[in-house]
Image (cartoon, grey):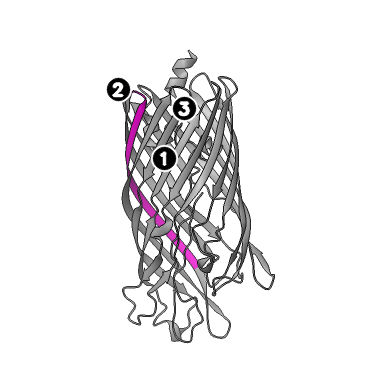
Amino acid sequence: MKRILLPAVPAAVACLVLSPSARAAGTALDVQSGRATGMAAAVTAMVDDSSAIYFNPAGIAQGRSFDAEVGDTLIVPSIKFTSPQGSSTTTPFYVVPPLQAYASGGLTDNFSIGVGIFTPYGQTLTWPSGWQGRSLLTSAQLATYDINPTIAYRAGPVRFGAGLQIVRGTVDLQRDIALPGGSYGSSELGGDAWGFGGNVGIQVEAVPKVLSFGAHYRSSVTLDFDGNAHFSGIPQTLAGTLHDQPASTRLVNPDTFAFGAAVRPTDRLAIEADVVYWGWNHMQSIDLKFPNDTSGQLSSSEPKNWKSVVNYHLGAEYTINETWRVRGGVLYDPSPSPASTLLPDLPDADRLNFAVGGSYWHPSGLHVDVGYQLVVFLSNTSTAPQFPGDYSGFVNVLGVSLGYSSKAAASAQ
């Protein structure tokens, strides 16, 4: 899993104690199938089912066959913040369930088409009511729904694929507003946007059934969010500025480039190593605009200074027999955020992901894939002057997919 920024509602007015600028929340998800989840997403060179629409579109070029799957990934985070004074707050229990669905088929022996629907970026983050960072964030919900029509072509040992990204984004962010006298109001920002991009991939079977390579590029997507800011519990003396009104901002999902190499030392065992570049350098600042704000005090720009990073995946799949497969993997996922911009709306840190999984295949071609990841947050200390402290925690991830493969059904007969 990776992460991304999305602003909350700023309000900086004289005589009002508020965080002075926009905030961010979000995460990028690479757990887009049960199979890949169990291999720590190390599948760029070897993926050969319809989930390749997300991981590497070249992988759907599998001849005159049909493949489809639908799945859900249950994400259960537990994040802890510890202030410099030693007081701690932990996020309550909740489950984030992004869905995914794919279908692909070969029109000829060499040309295939497909479509996928998935959530490449999304987050639900909730802190306890009345917690010490309530003026920064109480709740954040971000989702980007990617519709990805795809084509692929096979030329001997080489497969090519390309797709169009049609992205729908929605956001709802809430926080409390500290008012004079020690009371609190609240703010909520809701918005939506459409964006477009593309992705291309290649797989090369360098040594048939032994060694393969893969590469996949997914472009950045710009989402211009338009929505409304809602304020409640605001005293009359501030209602001239803090009142319901339109708001807008821009979010740029990063571009990514993955390269993988897969080797099969035996007919039953496949091992893959991937490196993935994430272009988080798009996030240098977050700008929030209130076009109808005559006071000029609500619009803001906050430097974020994120850097691009590379993460590292290692995964394996072992075929026990025609019915059962087992998987495992590990991922190192560094954070792109400097300590000086780390805040509780994006409780980020370098991460280690440990993955296990397996699948059951029926002779009919139906199969169930299950993958589990334990994501461990390495302790990270924020030096942000607004809210310094330490962040730690873990995330449980469970991916389950139900699929059908006509190729598997044919081989079982």
Q: Is residue 8 above or below residue 205?
A: below
Q: Quadrant of residue 172?
A: bottom left
C-alpha separation, residue under disc 2 versus residue under disc 3 = 25 Å
Q: Amino acid at mark 2?
A: Thr
Give the labeled residue for mark 3.
211
Q: Amino acid at mark 3?
A: Leu
Give the labeled residue for mark 2.
108
At horizontal 51% and vertical 34% (from top left) the residue drawn is 272
C-alpha separation, residue under disc 3 versus residue under disc 1 = 22 Å
C-alpha separation, residue under disc 1 versus residue under disc 2 = 22 Å
The magenta-colored residue range is: 156-174
User: In the rendered structure, which disc, 2 or 3, sits on the residue that comes first in sequence?
Assistant: 2
Q: Is residue 356 left or right of residue 101?
A: right
Residue count near mark 3 (Cα–Cα under 10 Å), binned few <14, some 14–19, many ≥20 = some
Q: Quadrant of residue 397?
A: top right
Residue count near mark 2 (Cα–Cα under 10 Å), binned few <14, some 14–19, many ≥20 = some
Give the labeled residue for mark 1.
54
Residue count near mark 1 (Cα–Cα under 10 Å), binned few <14, some 14–19, many ≥20 = many
User: In the rendered structure, which disc, 1 or 2, sits on the residue that comes first in sequence?
Assistant: 1
For the residue pair 319 and 215, the one nearer the viewer reads as 215
Task: Say if mark 1 contacts mark 2, CB within 8 Å.
Answer: no
Secondary element under disc 1, as helix, strand or loop, is helix
